[in-house]
Amino acid sequence: MADSPSLAIYIDGAPYLSPLLLKDLYGITGRSSVELRAAILAGEVVYSAELFGNDHVEVAPRLEKTVAFCERHGLAFRVEETYEGETERIGVDVMRNILESADGFS
């Protein structure tokens, strides 16, 4: 679904995350601790997901849990939406609204 929106979460500021926190984040995202550490240090995507696809039921909770992880640990983060080739930063409330609207299509 090339025209489907996608959401991506970045952890800003390249913070050091302990192995225990990386393990927790691995449990949420499914990405290895090595991948996560590299992504965080490089300012790259920690977790991203295409919406309205067959796996929406699996990826939407991971987006929510990644945000909750960042909030719980006081990490600066941002959410970006990409749709039709355009990427923009959005707030968590907007992300949740998008996920709720996508729930009707899964």
Image (tube, rainbow, N blue to C red):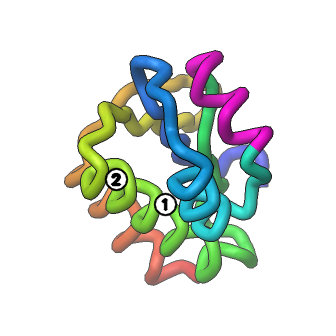
Q: On the image, numbered disc 1 is attached to which residue?
A: 63
Report helix, strand or loop for mark 1.
helix
Contact check, label 2 and label 1, Cβ < 8 Å? yes
Query: Is 39 inside the magenta-drawn segment?
Result: yes
How many numbered markers are drawn? 2
Q: Residue at x 31, y 32 (%)?
A: 76
Between 58 and 86, which is closer to the camera in this rendering?
58
Check the picture and name the quadrant holding the C terminus. bottom right
Quarter where residue 38 is shown: top right
Instruction: Please state if 10 lies on the left or on the right of 27 as rendered.
Output: left
Q: How busy is the neighbourhood of tag 2: few (under 14 within 10 Å), some, or many (20 plus)? A: many
* Image spot of residue 69 (x, y percent): 38, 58
Dominant SS of magenta comes to helix
Instruction: Please state if 46 lies on the left or on the right of 38 as rendered.
Output: left
Q: Residue at x 67, y 34 (%)?
A: 37
Report helix, strand or loop for mark 2.
helix
* Image spot of residue 71 (x, y percent): 26, 51
Quarter where residue 65 is shown: bottom left
Closer to the chain start, of discs 2 and 1, is: 1
Q: How busy is the neighbourhood of tag 1: few (under 14 within 10 Å), some, or many (20 plus)? A: many
Quarter where residue 78 is shown: top left
Query: Is 54 inside the magenta-drawn segment?
Result: no
Q: Residue at x 49, y 60 (%)?
A: 63
Magenta region = 34-43
Q: Amino acid at mark 1?
A: Leu
- Extreme residue toward the left, this view: 93
Q: On the image, numbered disc 2 is attached to which residue?
A: 95
Q: Residue at x 26, y 57 (%)?
A: 72
Q: Amino acid at mark 2?
A: Met
Tag nearer the camera, 2 or 1: 1
Instruction: Please state if 100 lies on the left or on the right of 33 as rendered.
Output: left
